[in-house]
């Protein structure tokens, strides 16, 4: 029944409930209608105005809270349906949105995924990066600036050289506009599969662009006939960089004062948040140029601008300064635009500041910010504040713990003043629940596998009984709900660099690194490439060929042994295998196996020979 049935048989609509705001307004209007002295009316009018202002500002604060909560929802699902969001499905539909299929006679070039690693020469840390990329199903990396026979004089050249060489790759024949690029340096580890990284990138860019739409709105096209919802939004995020806790530039540099506050909770470390003298308890809000991800068409203008800055300012010696300046200029222009859209009321600004409402305006008037009319300063750059893809380890070692989610436990707070935020158990991110077992990322592609099976391979855990819940994952326990980053970068002070050795035995794949590398070598170019081939085409994969090795920026292919067979700087007669695997099996590809027979899960002999008595025939 649509209405309440009252005595007498008359159907009467129910009386709508009044909101608190309507009650207050009604009371004020009633008071104004009452006869009384002028002073009472003046007081009533003042109270009415104050109530209205507080209501508007409170509404804005509620919207900010809702926006923050919706962002956290990406990492901490609030409903069962959100927990099963299709993060396990690579959103390549959006990736292909720009590809036109109107002309069937025109062959479409499907986008590919490229991994670029700036590295001048062979190091054991580079080999750790390459091992993690191979195990986790990334395409064969392209090494930028790499030289097998390195020249010591060339090693002293500034880091800006890698900017020009990455730009050359973006402009080269191997990179198409829709291709996806991931750049990490040789002091980084990949922790999660390529499929997860790609999916998180596209979902993260969508979510952050939604936030920008709420903050900056849509373009004013000067044509009222175009509905607002059909107009493009003012700003979007297209390229992702890492986020770090300290700004290496001067305080009056745009890279420091103009960047927005971190969206992480303002009390995430308790009352020490953003006040620690060494930055340990700062929320990440500044750019780290050591890791970047985006499509070629979006990254190209950024690197073109960076190359121009290098040319105009030969005194700049590293890429961090260059990219930080680009971000600072972008964010300063955004805040100037936002300020131009605000009401021109000093009283409103004063009241807003007194009530604790932030306008995100630059705190310092720029001293070295010179804008040129007509120059583009908007590049769609965003930072990974939540460490979903990029975890910057400098000043963040205490934020990261190795967690096995199958046996969750309470985490001790990095700051005693924020202990209350660590009362809940941590849970595996939903996208990893849908990912293949970490020990089943590669499949055998031939009946005669190379390298052949032996007892090393039999040591791998059963993938049918092992999920991401069962391995130790480096986890940022500070981010609300926790975050398992896809990439860890250890560039920083000496204590951060020392983690490259201290934490290597803790990363989930190290214990079985040799067997997993052998598994990768037997596979096709990856399960994604195999699936694409079955569909009749190649899809988002750098398919120039090769497996287990690397490409140089000049297009030369180098085998694993050429890059990681022998490196300088090892002590005590150690080999690369001693550091990478630590398993005592010797040189990779020449393992000192015992000749024991190895059987597959069906009981079939896959390595070794048995004599007539069922014993190994040696």
Image: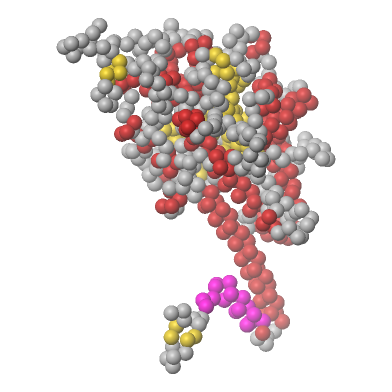
Image check: 599 left or right of 92? left
476 up-or-down from 578: above or below: below
Looking at the image, the residue that sits furthest to the left is 613
**Viewer-closest of 250 and 3:** 3
The percent coordinates of residue 486 (x first, y second) are: 49, 33
Image check: 357 left or right of 19? right
Tell me what residue is drawn at x 74 percent, y 47 percent.
336
Looking at the image, the residue that sits furthest to the front is 105
**Viewer-closest of 62 and 293:** 293
Tell me if residue 182 is in the magenta stretch.
no
The percent coordinates of residue 475 (x first, y second) are: 44, 36
**Viewer-closest of 178 and 232:** 178
- Is the C terminus in the top left, top right, bottom left or bottom right quadrant? top left
- Is the N terminus in the top left, top right, bottom left or bottom right quadrant? bottom left
* Start-end of magenta stretch: 16-32
194 up-or-down from 418: above or below: above
Tell me if residue 22 is in the magenta stretch.
yes
Image check: 257 left or right of 588? right
Viewer can see residue 547: yes
Tell me what residue is drawn at x 40 percent, y 43 percent.
427
Name the image quarter holding residue 29.
bottom right
Viewer can see residue 418: no
Tell me what residue is drawn at x 65 percent, y 43 percent.
102
The percent coordinates of residue 593 (x first, y second) are: 32, 11
The percent coordinates of residue 417 (x first, y second) are: 47, 44
Tell me what residue is drawn at x 40 percent, y 21 percent.
446
Image check: 454 left or right of 230? left
**Viewer-closest of 167 and 335:** 167
């Amino acid at each position: 029944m649509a209405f309440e049935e009252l005595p007498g048989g008359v159907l009467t609509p129910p009386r709508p409930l009044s909101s608190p705001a309507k009650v207050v307004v009604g009371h004020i209007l009633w008071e104004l209608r009452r006869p009384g002295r002028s002073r009472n009316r003046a007081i009533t009018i003042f109270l009415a105005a104050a109530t209205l202002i507080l209501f508007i500002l409170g509404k804005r604060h509620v919207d900010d809270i809702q926006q923050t909560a919706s962002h956290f929802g990406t990492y901490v699902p609030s409903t069962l349906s959100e927990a099963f969001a299709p993060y396990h499905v690579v959103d390549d539909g959006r990736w292909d949105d720009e590809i036109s299929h109107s002309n069937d006679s025109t062959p479409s070039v499907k986008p590919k995924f490229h991994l670029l690693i700036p590295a001048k020469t062979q190091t054991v840390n580079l080999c750790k990066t390459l091992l993690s990329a191979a195990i986790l199903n990334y395409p064969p990396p392209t090494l930028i600036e790499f030289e097998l026979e390195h020249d010591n004089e060339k090693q002293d050249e500034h880091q800006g050289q890698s900017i020009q060489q990455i730009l050359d790759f973006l402009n080269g024949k191997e990179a198409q506009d829709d291709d996806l690029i991931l750049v990490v340096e040789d002091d980084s580890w990949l922790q999660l599969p390529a499929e997860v990284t790609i999916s998180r990138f596209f979902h993260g860019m969508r979510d952050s662009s939604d936030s920008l739409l709420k903050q900056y709105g849509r373009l004013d096209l000067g044509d009222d006939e175009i509905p607002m919802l059909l107009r493009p939004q003012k700003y979007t995020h297209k390229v992702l960089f890492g986020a770090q806790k300290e700004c290496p530039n001067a305080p009056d540099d745009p890279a420091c004062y103009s960047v927005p506050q971190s969206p992480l909770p303002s009390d995430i470390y308790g009352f020490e948040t953003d006040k620690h003298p060494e930055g340990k308890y700062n929320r990440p809000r500044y750019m780290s140029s050591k890791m970047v991800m985006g499509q070629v068409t979006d990254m190209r203008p950024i690197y073109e601008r960076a190359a121009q800055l290098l040319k105009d300012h030969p005194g700049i010696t590293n890429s961090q300064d260059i990219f930080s300046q680009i971000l600072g200029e972008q964010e300063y222009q955004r805040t100037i635009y936002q300020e131009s859209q605000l009401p021109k009321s000093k009283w409103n600004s004063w009241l807003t500041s007194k009530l604790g409402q932030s306008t995100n305006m630059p705190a310092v008037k720029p001293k070295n910010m010179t804008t040129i009319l007509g120059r583009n300063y908007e590049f769609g750059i965003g930072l990974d504040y939540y460490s979903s893809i990029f975890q910057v380890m400098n000043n963040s070692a205490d934020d990261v713990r190795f967690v096995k989610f199958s046996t969750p436990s309470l985490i001790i707070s990095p700051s005693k003043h924020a202990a209350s935020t660590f009362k809940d158990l941590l849970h595996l991110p939903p996208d990893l629940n849908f990912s293949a077992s970490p020990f089943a990322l590669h499949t055998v592609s031939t009946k005669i596998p190379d390298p052949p099976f032996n007892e090393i391979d039999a040591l791998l855990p059963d993938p049918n009984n092992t999920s991401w819940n069962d391995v130790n994952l480096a986890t940022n326990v500070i981010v609300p709900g926790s975050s398992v980053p896809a990439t860890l970068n250890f560039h920083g002070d000496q204590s951060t660099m020392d983690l490259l050795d201290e934490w290597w035995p803790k990363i989930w794949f190290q214990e079985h690194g040799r067997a997993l590398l052998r598994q990768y070598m037997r596979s096709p170019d990856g399960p994604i490439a195999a699936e694409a081939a079955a569909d009749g085409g190649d899809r988002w994969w750098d398919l120039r060929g090769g497996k287990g090795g690397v490409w140089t920026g000049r297009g030369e292919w180098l085998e694993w042994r050429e890059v990681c067979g022998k490196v300088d700087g090892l002590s005590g007669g150690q080999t690369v295998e001693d550091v990478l695997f630590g398993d005592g099996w010797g040189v990779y590809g020449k393992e000192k196996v015992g000749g024991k027979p190895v059987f597959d899960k069906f009981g079939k002999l896959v390595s070794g020979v048995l004599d007539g008595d069922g014993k190994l025939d040696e």
